[in-house]
Amino acid sequence: MRCIALLLVLLSGLAHADWEDGSFPEGSTAATVKRHEFRLNLIGKSAFGITDRVELSSYLPLVIFPNLGLKVRLLDAAAVKLAFEVDLGAGALPLVGGGALPFPGGVLAGGAGGLLLGSVQLGELHLSLKPAHAWTVSARVAGIAMEGGFLGLGGGAVAGGGGAGGVILPLAFGKAATAVSGGLELDVVLDERNALSAQGDFMHLAGVYGGLVLFSAAWTHAWEHVHLQVGVYNTFGVPWTEPPKLPVAPFVNVYWVFNRAPVPGAPLPPPPPVPATLAAPAADEAPVP
């Protein structure tokens, strides 16, 4: 336990997060990651900075649903930031199923196989206000279009009573839906290693009464290249017909920061101390033969 405690102290001493300007790029705000910086997120959205105002992003864990996002900062004032984001995703999942039902003197069987298809398009506007250096209040609104369907073959067969027969038919069906969502977020940078965030979002599906609310709160601790995020979340429907079985659920997330660039004008970390045996002799000292 002492070794673990010592390791944590040493790692904390190496911490240097990218929060010198009071921004928290890890949240869903109008901020973007800096030029050529790459943030690899374990369960959330990873991002790469094309420029200081344009970033590409993706939920990499969604292997069967490739997706890509583009965020552009339209306004970058000291106290106000405005950004627009577009996300696209599409995927296919092989699906096979079947069964058989025996009856007196015979059996009835059927099955289907094909691809379960899906796609989503999202456009989102982010507005972030900074009432203080370390505080950021953000609002967002989005329009979402979703499509889903199945493409494959289905068939059935029956055997019994001295005969058998079957049929195979193509299957193709799908449905499209639209939704709107909005949310609020508060991010507070406590120091160069710790930050707090809380957010709430509401999504309404067109043609459906009510909607879905998602709330989360988290603490983030940053080392030089690794960030650890611990928090809780909850989802519930509106109207609230019954309380959720689990009031809150915990989550843990880890992400890595590569090609980090210091904020212009921010103080640089002090250089590591030079051992006395390697220090250069003073000008008035004669070298030892």
Image (cartoon, grey):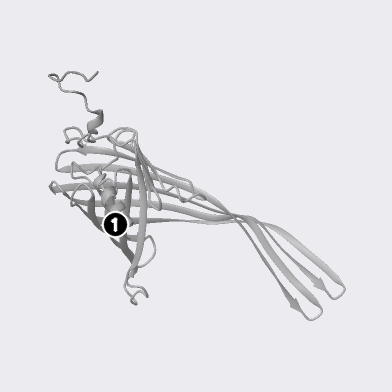
State the residue at coordinates (42%, 48%): 59
Q: Position of residue 116 (x, y in %)?
A: 56, 55
Residue at (14% x, 43% y) in the render: 79
Query: How many marks overall?
Result: 1
* Left or right for 49, reference 198: right
Against 184, residue 158 (above or below) is below
Q: Measured from the top left, where is residue 242 in percent x and y?
A: 34, 77
Judge by depth and name the residue closer to the eye, 226 or 117: 226
**Residue 179's image quarter?**
bottom left
Farthest residue in the bottom direction? 104
- Specify the amino acid type for callout 1: Ala
Q: Quadrant of the N terminus?
A: bottom left
Choose between 90 and 259: the one closer to the eye.
259
Q: Residue furthest front?
A: 289
**242 or 23, nearer to the observer:** 23
104 or 258, which lies in front?
258
Is residue 4 toward the left or the right of residue 170 in the image? left
Q: Secondary structure at mark 1?
A: helix
Label 1 environment density (alpha carbons within 10 Å; few <14, some 14–19, many ≥20)? few
